[in-house]
Image (cartoon, rainbow, N blue to C red):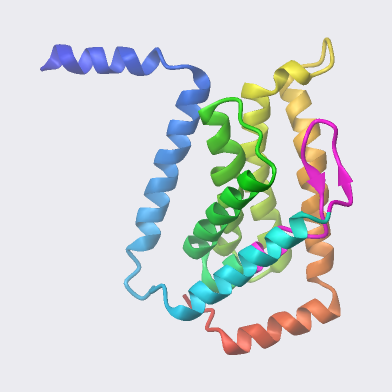
C-alpha cells in the first residue's frame, strides 16, 4: 500500500509545471465553489438565471466591439467585463464565477486559440470565471472591478509565462513579457470598466436594478 502511494507521489512530481498549475487552480476553485455552495440561504432562482443570461449575452456582444486589438492577442473593448462584474456584485461570487465560465466558453467559440489543454483552462474558463471574484467585495464597485481584473490577469499571466514565452522579444524575460502584455491589455479594460461604472447614467441604472433585486445573498 505504501509503495503504491510513493509511486503516485513520484508520478505527481513528474508532471510538467503547466499541468501542476492548472490542477492546483482547479482544486482551489472546487474548494471555493464547494464552500460557497454550502450556503443554505442561496438558491438559483429564476431571477438569478435570467439576469445571468442577460449579463453574459451583453458581455458577449460588447466583446465584438474592439477598440484596439493587440498583435499578440487580446483586445480593448468598451467594458465587456462590466456586465459580469455587476452580476457578481448583485448576486455574489458563486453565480458570478459560473456566469464567467459560461462567457469563457462563448469566447472560445468566438475567437479560439488553443495550443495546450492547460492553456485552454487558463485562458478561457478560469480567466473569465475569475471575474466572479468581484462578488467577494460588493461595497465599492471600483474595488470589485479591481478584484475581477486581477483575477483574470493572474490566469492570463500564468498562461503567458507557461505557453507564450516564445513570442517574447529576444533577451526579454518571459515573466516580464507576460506581465507587460497582460498587464496593459487587462489593466486598460479594467480601468474602462471602473470609469464607465461611475457614469451617472450607469449608477442610476444600477440603483434601479438593486431595488428590484435583493443583494443580501
Residue 8's image quarter?
top left
At horizontal 79% and vertical 52% (from top left) the residue drawn is 189
Compared with residue 211, is residue 50 higher up or lower down, i.e. above or below? above
Compared with residue 206, is residue 159 higher up or lower down, i.e. above or below? above
- Whether residue 138 appears in this view of the structure is no
At horizontal 59% and vertical 49% (from top left) the residue drawn is 104
Q: Quadrant of the N terminus?
A: top left
Q: Please indicate whether residue 167 sits to the left or right of residue 126 in the image.
A: right
Compared with residue 55, is residue 173 higher up or lower down, i.e. above or below? above
Magenta segment boundaries in residue numbering: 66-86
Q: Please indicate whether residue 112 sits to the left or right of residue 101 in the image.
A: right
Q: Residue furthest right?
A: 67
Could you say where residue 40 lies in the image, as x and y percent from the top left?
A: 32, 72
Q: Residue furthest left?
A: 1
Could you say where residue 173 lies in the image, as x and y percent from the top left?
A: 76, 17
At horizontal 23% and vertical 13% (from top left) the residue drawn is 6
- Asked if the stretch drawn in magenta spans residue 208, the answer is no
Could you say where residue 7 lies in the image, as x and y percent from the top left?
A: 24, 12
Residue 112's image quarter?
top right
Q: Please indicate whether residue 216 sits to the left or right of residue 172 in the image.
A: left
- Asked if the stretch drawn in magenta spans residue 68, the answer is yes
At horizontal 89% and vertical 46% (from top left) the residue drawn is 68
- Whether residue 180 appears in this view of the structure is yes
Total marks in image: 0
Could you say where residue 203 lies in the image, as x and y percent from the top left?
A: 77, 79
Q: Please indicate whether residue 61 sits to the left or right of residue 53 in the image.
A: right
Amino acid at each position: 500500500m505504501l509503495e503504491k502511494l510513493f509511486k503516485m507521489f513520484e508520478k505527481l512530481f513528474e508532471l510538467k509545471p503547466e499541468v501542476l498549475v492548472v490542477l492546483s487552480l482547479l482544486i482551489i476553485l472546487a474548494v471555493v465553489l464547494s464552500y460557497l455552495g454550502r450556503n443554505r440561504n442561496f438558491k438559483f432562482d429564476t431571477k438569478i438565471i435570467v439576469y445571468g443570461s442577460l449579463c453574459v449575452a451583453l458581455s458577449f456582444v460588447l466583446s465584438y466591439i474592439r477598440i484596439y486589438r493587440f498583435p499578440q492577442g487580446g483586445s480593448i473593448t468598451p467594458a465587456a467585463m462590466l456586465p459580469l462584474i455587476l452580476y457578481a456584485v448583485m448576486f455574489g461570487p458563486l453565480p458570478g464565477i459560473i456566469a464567467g465560465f459560461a462567457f469563457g466558453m462563448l469566447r472560445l467559440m468566438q475567437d479560439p486559440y488553443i495550443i495546450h489543454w492547460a492553456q485552454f483552462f487558463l485562458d478561457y474558463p478560469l480567466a473569465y470565471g475569475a471575474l466572479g471574484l468581484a462578488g467577494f467585495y460588493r461595497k465599492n464597485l471600483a474595488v470589485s472591478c479591481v478584484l475581477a481584473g486581477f483575477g483574470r490577469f493572474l490566469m492570463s499571466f500564468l498562461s503567458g509565462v507557461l505557453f507564450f514565452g516564445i513570442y517574447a522579444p529576444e533577451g526579454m524575460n518571459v515573466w516580464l513579457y507576460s506581465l507587460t502584455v497582460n498587464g496593459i491589455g487587462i489593466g486598460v479594460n479594467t480601468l474602462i470598466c471602473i470609469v464607465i461604472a461611475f457614469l451617472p447614467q450607469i449608477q442610476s441604472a444600477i440603483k434601479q436594478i438593486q431595488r428590484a433585486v435583493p443583494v443580501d445573498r
